[in-house]
Image: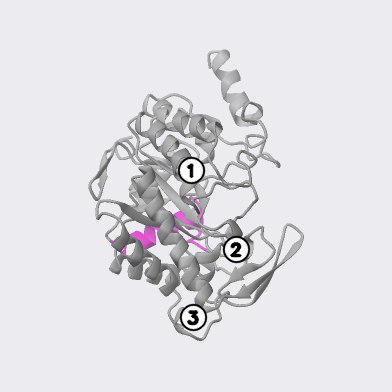
Amino acid sequence: MNKLFEAMNLKNLKIKNRICVPPMVCYNWVEEDGYAVQRNIDHYRAIARGGAGLIIQEATCVDPEGKLSKDQLGIWEDGQIDGLKEIVDAVHEEDCPIFLQIHHAGVNGSGEYLLCPSDYEMDKDGEKRIGHEMTKEQIQKVQDQFVKAAVRAYQAGYDGVELHGCHSYLMCEFFNSRVNKRTDEYGQYPERFAVEILERIKEAVPKEFIVGIRLGAFEPALTDGIRHAKLLEEHGIDFLDISYGFSGEDEPGAPKDFPYKDVIHAAGEIKKHVSVPVFAVNSITDARMAEDILERTGVDMADIGRGVLVNYNWAIDAKEGRDTGRCLHCKECQWGIDAEKCAGRVLLNRKRNMGE
């Protein structure tokens, strides 16, 4: 496991290994006010204690009208800073850096009036979603909200922010030409929405504060994802966390002989075109796989998500050669209901109790 446990620098930030815990929303934990609660603090403290090199905190909304669910963490007002600072302090006490993912759900939101670059209709969970084309004033307002959220994240003590630019949410909707049908500069130049936010954040925070993005690889094709990545690097992005883009309006794919998910192959292809750190994610289930992905693709970090939910000590166990456990992909995730009933966690604990 030479590569996986090799330290790296992201700008001036020292990261002790190549294991990143990516953003994963914890539903049903917070109230509609979006304020952090003790359960959030304890959760991230436990993850940090488990030995990962970096944590990216779950999607935290910049606008109460842009939430993906009613019970989502928020960073749309100054009063939320103190609770978020408690999360940061808990993680830093365990010698782990933490970034905050800042987010607007767009047409995938839970509000009554859903924003989108262009008029757009889609079905989600059996419900019709109707996105309304944003005016220039609405675009400006949301951009302002992202910038103010980044400043609040800095004030709370985070080491950086990650713009949520994938998974069918608002920034992703601008990137994808099958969703973004605008004829103005935000349609002709689909990266403009994100680039303007990036540049304004860079102006508003100290230069050591890190600003990255979770970017869709296929937007709609990989060639588009590569173009977006290169342009973002030209405008100062500090890292690229590669995932899927707008589901149903994309063209994912990889060579037939590639042994992992197509989005991991895409991360490797994007890495060939940029010099900033690139993260790979999706179904990385054990340390050997993570090591092989780092070596095979040339990416800089491996995102370990569900595995860490099963086993907070995933990184420590991987380094010491123990069974890390794995997510069993239950039809309905039990972890979000009661973590102790998570089938993967129950199985891992049973094996350990039996001395396996």
The disc placed on residue 247 is 2
Place of residue 242 in the rendered image (x, y in percent of width and height, measured from the top left) = 44, 56
Which residue matches tag 3? 187
Q: Select label 3 or label 2 by which is in front.
A: 3
Place of residue 297 in the rendered image (x, y in percent of width and height, measured from the top left) = 36, 53
**Relative to 152, 183 lies left or right:** right
* Residue 271: in magenta span: yes
Which is nearer the N-term, disc 3 or disc 2?
Answer: 3
The one of 2 and 62 positioned closer to us in this rendering: 62
Q: CA distance from mark 3 to mark 2?
A: 19 Å
Which residue matches tag 1? 284
From what the image shows, is residue 134 above or below residue 243? below
Which amino acid is tagged 2? Ser
Helix, strand or loop at mark 2: loop
What is the crowding at mark 2: few (fewer than 14 residues within 10 Å), some, or many (at least 20)? some
Q: Which residues are magenta?
A: 253-274
